[in-house]
Amino acid sequence: MKRVAPRQDAPKDSTSAFATRVVSGVVYAVLFIACLIAGSLTTAGFVALISALCCYEFFQMMRLDGKVPNMLLGVAAAALFPLAALGESIAMTALIFIFVLSCGLWYVYTPRTRIADVAVTLMGPLYTGFMLSSIVLLRDAEPGLAGALLAIGSCASLWVSDSLAYLVGRQFGRHKMAPKISPKKSWEGFAGGIAGAVIIWLIVWATHFFPLELWYAVLTGVVVSVLGVFGDLIESRIKRGVGVKDSGNLIPGHGGMLDRCDSLIFGCITAQLMLVIGGIL
């Protein structure tokens, strides 16, 4: 009779998956931060690339739902939004006008195109490129190191929030936050994520590069973290609606680019709005 070995596969697999997630996440973050430090142009270029990838993955998921988006128009617009953020405000307005007009003309001159296809084509770049262009605006808001710190702090607060939410939820998570949409999310992890974001914004406050008061730094950390979670839940709802676990497989341990950027999509634009409302920018 064969001897049955102890069942240790699950813990090993779990540890290996976590290690893969950490390594790929660090590589992604280092590359992202290097582009932010290098300047506004490299930031815009990198954000344009990830926006195009996010939009492409979104369109691929919509195809599973029977929609037929215009890949060329949508992905091009997603890439152009972050680049337009470097120019005057009229550049972004003009881009939105041209994009919406192009989608309208596509609908008029292709009888087989349904309004649902147009709606998905419009949503993709707005959901990805337009929202992520806030990272470029944050980097370009202040010259030199100050602008880099602002953009890095905004992104890092969401990365740390995601990581602490994952770790705290994995260790202490008992009360499910949205079991039908994202079964692994817990209120304990949610609290841990908020704490992580607040820590990063306290570091930004401590640099004294900006006229940021302590209480407003804490408030910004809380609001940015909460909106980052909403971004995560929105993408989870999209994936659940089309029946996929990940938006893609580009980043080992994380899934697709959209999986990695879901919290940035809503979190970074929230950071920008909070800083403008608070008179910091």
Image (cartoon, rainbow, N blue to C red):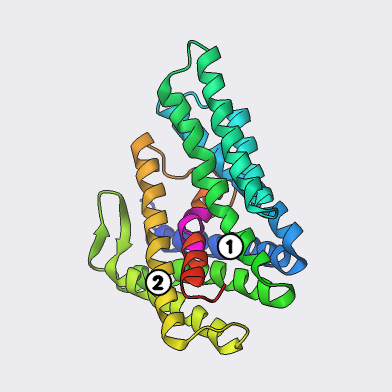
The part of the image, by quadrant, that contains residue 249 is: top right
Other-residue count near label 2 (Cα within 10 Å), few / some / many at <14 / 14–19 / ≥20: many
Q: Residue at x 44, y 75 (%)?
A: 221
What residue is pinned by disc 1? Answer: 25
Other-residue count near label 1 (Cα within 10 Å), few / some / many at <14 / 14–19 / ≥20: some
Which residues are drawn in magenta? 260-268
From the viewer's perspective, is 138 left or right of 214? right
From the viewer's perspective, is 264 left or right of 236? right
Q: Position of residue 70 (x, y in %)?
A: 56, 26
Q: Position of residue 102 (x, y in %)?
A: 59, 27
What residue is pinned by disc 2? Answer: 193
Q: Please indicate, yes or no, whether residue 3 appears anywhere in the rendered image.
A: no
Looking at the picture, which amino acid does disc 1 mark? Answer: Gly
Query: Circle 2 — which element?
Result: helix
Mark 2 or 1: the one toward you: 2
Query: Would residue 265 be counted in the magenta stretch?
Result: yes
- Our reading of the magenta stretch's main secondary structure is helix
Please say if 279 is above or below 91. below
In the depicted view, which residue is nearer to us: 136 or 60? 136
Mark 2 or mark 1: name the one nearer the start of the chain.
1
Estimate the spatial distance between the alpha carbons at disc 2 and disc 1, rounded to whole Å: 16 Å
Looking at the picture, which amino acid does disc 2 mark? Answer: Gly
In the depicted view, which residue is nearer to us: 65 or 219? 219
Please say if 99 is above or below 228. above
Q: Position of residue 281 (x, y in %)?
A: 57, 72
